[in-house]
Image (cartoon, grey):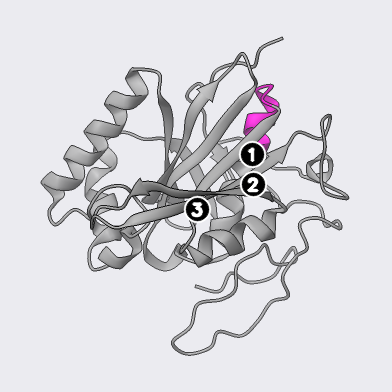
Amino acid sequence: MTARPPAPVALAGRYVMLEPLRIDHVPDLFAAQRGLETDWGWLPVSAPRSQAEMRLIVEQRLAQQAAGGAFLFAVLDARIRRPVGWIAYLNICVIDQRLDVGWHWIGGALAESYATVEIHLLLVQHAFDLGFTRVQWQLDDLDRNGHHTMRQIGAVREGLLQRHQKRPDGTWRDTVLYAVLAPSRAAPPGGFANLSLTAGPSPAPAPASGPWPAPAPAQAPVQGRRPPLGLPPGGAAYLP
């Protein structure tokens, strides 16, 4: 039995909406990225310095998608319905029911917020709905926020690939492999079987509370510091 390849679809959560990446997203993406060059440290390209450079990067990614090597989503802030980042399915293997989630970048007020975890939950649940049984991530060993996100969603750290890939600055990165298996194969206690995230044109209701992922308590913002990652309890205010 094989999985179904990803197809254009909108996925809606409490804080974000995901829709297929398009060229007309470029102006808003560049506006979200401008001034946040350091946030691009984990992507295998340098941060764009102009809208034209952003367009070139998007065109390259869409060409990769057309060749069957990826499926890309724009990340929209659900409050304003404007693109503020992107994320992708990569290394899609329908026969082995396996794919990667990568090329994650999000700017603006949603960076390093509850939305970061929700993006990954939406994509994992959608992959399971398509019949994939393994979702994996390959993170730079120095990407501490990325590792924290993996802990929040219950991904298993499976190993370290040393001197695995060059960064844009020429240094070598070690890559950490994480994975989540579909509930029929394995899952954390109370795992994805309890996750309810609905695709559609508008934000879905909050996922039902349960033992996993553990909801983060609502906290007052601390000046100069973003809120912790993790999904807050239902009804809690979003902390930008």
CB of mark 1 within 8 Å of CB of mark 2?
Answer: yes
Q: Locate residue 83 relative to residue 77 in the image: left or right.
A: left
Q: Are marks 3 and 1 in contact (CB under 8 Å)?
A: no
Q: Is residue 99 magenta?
A: no
132 displayed left or right of 22: right
Residue underneath mark 2: 121
Q: Quadrant of residue 19?
A: top left
**Residue position marked by numbered label 1 in the rendering:** 124
Q: Residues within 10 Å of mark 3 (few under 14, many from 20)?
A: some
Q: CA distance from mark 3 to mark 1?
A: 19 Å
Q: Residue furthest front?
A: 162
Is 130 or 46 nearer to us in this picture? Answer: 46
Residue 233 x/y as whole percent: 75, 66
- Main secondary structure along the magenta-highlighted residues: helix
Residue located 63% across and 36% down the image: 135
User: In the figure, 225 relative to 237: above or below?
Assistant: below
Give, as a three-letter code, the residue at label 1. Val
Instruction: Name the residue that disc number 3 marks.
Output: 78
Q: Give the magenta range.
A: 124-132
Q: CA distance from mark 1 to mark 2?
A: 5 Å
Residue 126 on the magenta segment: yes
Check disc 2 and give the amino acid type: Leu
Q: State how far apart marks 3 and 2 are (Cα).
A: 16 Å
Q: Residues within 10 Å of mark 1 (few under 14, many from 20)?
A: many
N-terminal of the pair, mark 3 or mark 2, is 3
Q: Amino acid at mark 3?
A: Ala
Q: Nearer the viewer, residue 27 or 173?
A: 173
